[in-house]
Amino acid sequence: MSNRPAPLVAARDLVKSYGRTPALRGACLEVGEGEIVAVTGASGSGKSTLLHCLAGIVRPDGGTVTYDGKRVDLLPEDRLSELRRTDFGVMFQFGQLIPELTAVDNVALPLMLAGTARGTAQERAEEWLERFGVREQKDLRPGELSGGQEQRVALARALVTGPRVVFADEPTGALDSLAGEQVMTALVGAARASGAAVLLITHDATVAAYADREVRLRDGAVVGAEVPA
Amino acid sequence: MSTRHILLGLLAKGPSHGYELKQRHDEHFPQARPLAYGQVYTTLQRLVRDGLAEVEGTDSDGGPERTLYRLTEKGSREVTAWAGQVTPPAPFVANEIFTKVVVTILTGGDPAAHLLAQRAAHMERMRELTALKTAPGADLTTVLSADYALNHLDADLRWMTTTQARLASLTALTMEVDRA
């Protein structure tokens, strides 16, 4: 572990409660540049909260989150939004696409929010849809897509801005095993090609097996030795 | 399952000699325990004795003379009937992991630590198999056999996860009782 390069994303002693329910109790985790890490654990073990804290979606009550050496947990809201837009890609189990927009517009949206012209954004979006085998579905809305197609569109949206880290929370949780395999192959292949790191949350060991290593959570803390450097 | 039926199945692709059958086996069952040559030859002799296969002749192909075997009508019926039979869902639990966990409990060891270490070993193997089946150009038998192995390892893991949770709640319960 001492040979591992400086982490791109690091959580140290994270504590977070929702009301009186503790979700994280001292969780530590590091993800290196280009590394794919799976976080597994039972329901309620704190997996999603850990991802939310690392992605800057939720602020921890205690502990630190760093990204590329900067304290994410201390960033003001506007800087945090910018970081999420430029450096992070996020993908959930479902419900992340905007139902009123077509597949291609959903994928183009993050680029347009970052100031890319509509035409260029749509071209780039189509390239990503092509890459994940859903270009034919580009003019369909999320409700008209199968679960597997929807997740591949969501994956295209998470990757279109060229993020350095992809946060994926149960990306195959609602899919059958073959559709899940397609999504995981696409996610891992694209991340390896671009050098993006991936933090993957899953309860499924066959999905976790796509990652370089597994970190197991129980009761809001890491099981076994995830020792800070 | 027996080497007998596997060899009959491989002979169904056409007459062959022992060495080639061993190669066909490794190609079609890539994650299976490799067949020993000795086992191939003794099984072939038994198949001939039982009328399920017969000697077609010999070829030398420039090297030493080799006996060619082919499937008989009876052998063909036998292997088709066998492959069509529903396999009884395994009634006995005789897995080494299960046994070791029980023995660890019996001997007052730490089953949770054992399960954690076993999980790491399982995950390592699952990563290897996933890499194998998702490698560009992986052929169908590799993908199918990797899938089969992955799903069985996953079943082990799910049992281990449930066991760990059960042990934790049982331990908590025991401590409650001790305090009472």
Image: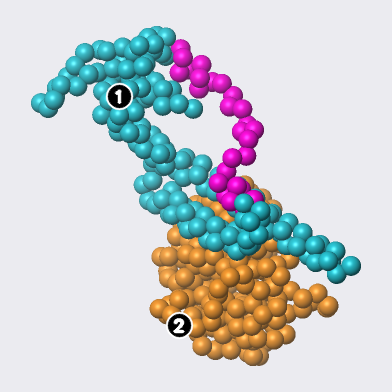
- Quick one: label 1, few (<14), some, or many (20+) residues within 10 Å? some
Q: Which image quarter: residue A113? A: bottom right
Taking the view exactly as shown, the residue that stands out farthest to the right is: B180
Q: Which residue is mark 1?
A: B41
Say which chain is cyan.
Answer: B
What whole-number distance in Å separates the C-alpha atoms at marks 1 and 2?
Answer: 57 Å
Closer to us: mark 1 or mark 2? 1
Number of marks: 2
Front one among B35 and A63: B35
Magenta stretch: includes residue B160 = no
Q: Secondary structure at mark 1?
A: helix
Q: Report if residue A139 is visible in the image.
A: no
* Label at residue A6: 2
Do tags 1 and 2 sit on the same chain?
no
Residue A169 location, quadrant: bottom right
Q: Position of residue A118 (x, y in %)?
A: 54, 71
Residue A72 on image: x %, y %: 60, 86
Give, as a three-letter code, the residue at label 1: Tyr
For chain A, give the colour.
orange
> What kind of residue is marked 2?
Ala
Could you say which disc has been placed on residue B121 in the image?
none
The magenta region covers: B77-102
- The image quarter containing residue A64 is bottom right
- Chain of the residue under the numbered disc 1 shown in the image: B
